[in-house]
Image (spheres, rainbow, N blue to C red):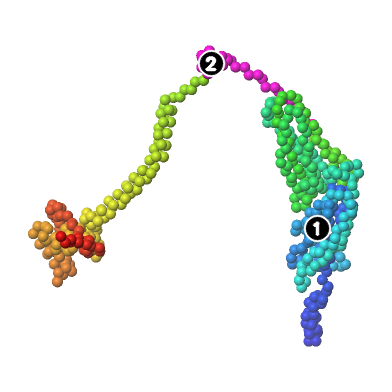
Amino acid sequence: MKTLQVWLVWLACLAPLAALGDELVVRVETRLVPAATVPVGGTLRLEVDLLVDTWFTAPPQLPELELADAAVTSPRGRADHLSERRDGKNLFGLRFTYLIIPDKARRFDIPALAIQVSPGQAAGPLRVHSQPLGFVAHPLPGTDPQRPPLVARTVTLDQRILRSHDPLRVGDSVTRELRMIAMGAQAARLPAPEAAHIEGLKHYRGAPRLHPVDDGRGDLLGAQRLDSLSYVVERPGRYRLPAIELQWWDQDASQLRRVSAEAVEFEVEAPAAYQAAFDISEDLQRLGRHARWQLARHWLLLAGMLLLGVGLVVFARQRFLAALDTLGRYCKARQAAWHASAAFAWRQVPGQLTRQPARLDALYLWVRRRCGSVTLNGLSGKVSADLAAQLRTFLKSRYGQEPQNGADLSTLRRLLPKLRRETSAQGLRLVVRPGLKPLYPPFPPKRTNQ
């Protein structure tokens, strides 16, 4: 029993090695659809199938295909998913499609395409090559080789007529909108309809609008072209827009077919002659006046005021700006003078006395600006003796050699109105003397010896 368990362990270890030893399967298959022959102007599909037995770790890289005398549209990364079983193995892959439209009747050789694939369990990207192919483009019987017709499976052409006015008059327009849908063809191959030149009508061609037609899942089925032809009426009469006919080659039935939009007829009426109820020119000649202008006085006054205002703005602009600058400097000077005045300092005193702790710097500043003194004792000689004694008593009790911590500021608040009244009554003015001598004092005049 123990030997059987050992063998089972060995088989489990060797199974992944056996799987890795299998050869990696990468297949490239190419084909031409619907056949190896195609009419000039027809669409040929080159299908490239990439099949692997694992998965793709990165999108395959296909080269650009260029053929002389043919228009080639590359897959541009679009592909269909495949799942097939070959030789007892499940293969998974992608199908890329090149669209080829030959422009000349001859044989075309498609070289081998170098394709880079990244299958799972591979050491790195692999480069594989497709099989070279060839096809023949044959001319269309019964057609002009220089101007080959449109090649498609089905073609429809319809129109819509739009009138700018009904009934039509000179200067109105008639617009002819044409819509062409071609299945099995590309938008760049759809021809433009011809606009007939008609006397009395001036035609304009609008820019065409091209749209692909698909099945809703991204597979291209055909194309659609919208054209607009506008005709402007220059003179009255009866007009007829001729039918528009298009020849195209049925690729499935291999025969030439025609599709057309029917002719359009319309009539433009002549404008009725206008006759005035009376002849204005005769009345003017009878009055002896050719033209007369009348303007209201208020409009003249308004125009004059407007011109005057513009002139004032133009000529007085510099003086107005200078006056604004002078006014600004004056306001700044007044504000600076107010901040340096005793009244401004006095306004700060009540607020500072209510703070905790109280401040007296505003009071000292007021005293200095009002009386020129730097201390409160300097006010003693400027006020009455009674007020000076009360002020000295307060200062001694609060700031003397033995200050009383409980000294209340209410006494000072009661003295402030009296201080201001008495100093104002005496008309004290601050005389500011410079504290420093001039930096560059003037030299004394030289004495001359007589």
Q: Position of residue 246 (x, y in %)?
A: 82, 39
Q: Residue at x 77, y 69 (%)?
A: 125
The span shown in magenta is 262-290
In this picture, is 354 found above or below 257?
A: below
What amino acid type is highlighted by mark number 1? Leu
Left or right: residue 432 versus residue 94 is left
Closer to us: 402 or 147: 147
Spot occupied by residue 175 in the image (x, y as percentages of width and height) = 72, 34
Outermost residue to the left: 385
Pointers 1 and 2 in contact (CB under 8 A)?
Answer: no
For image coordinates 40% across by 34% down, the residue present is 308
Residue at the limit of the structure toward the top, as seen here: 286
Q: Horizontally, is 320 left or right of 168 in the view?
A: left
Judge whether 244 appears above or below 4 on screen.
above
Q: Which residue is mark 2?
A: 284
Which one is nearer the viewer's eye here, 34 or 320?
A: 320
Q: Secondary structure at mark 1?
A: loop
Q: Nearer the viewer, residue 315 or 87?
A: 315
Residue 65's label in the rendered image is 1
Residue at the image point whose x is 84% and y is 52% from the top: 69
Q: Is 277 colored magenta in this rendering? A: yes
The quadrant in which the N terminus is found is bottom right
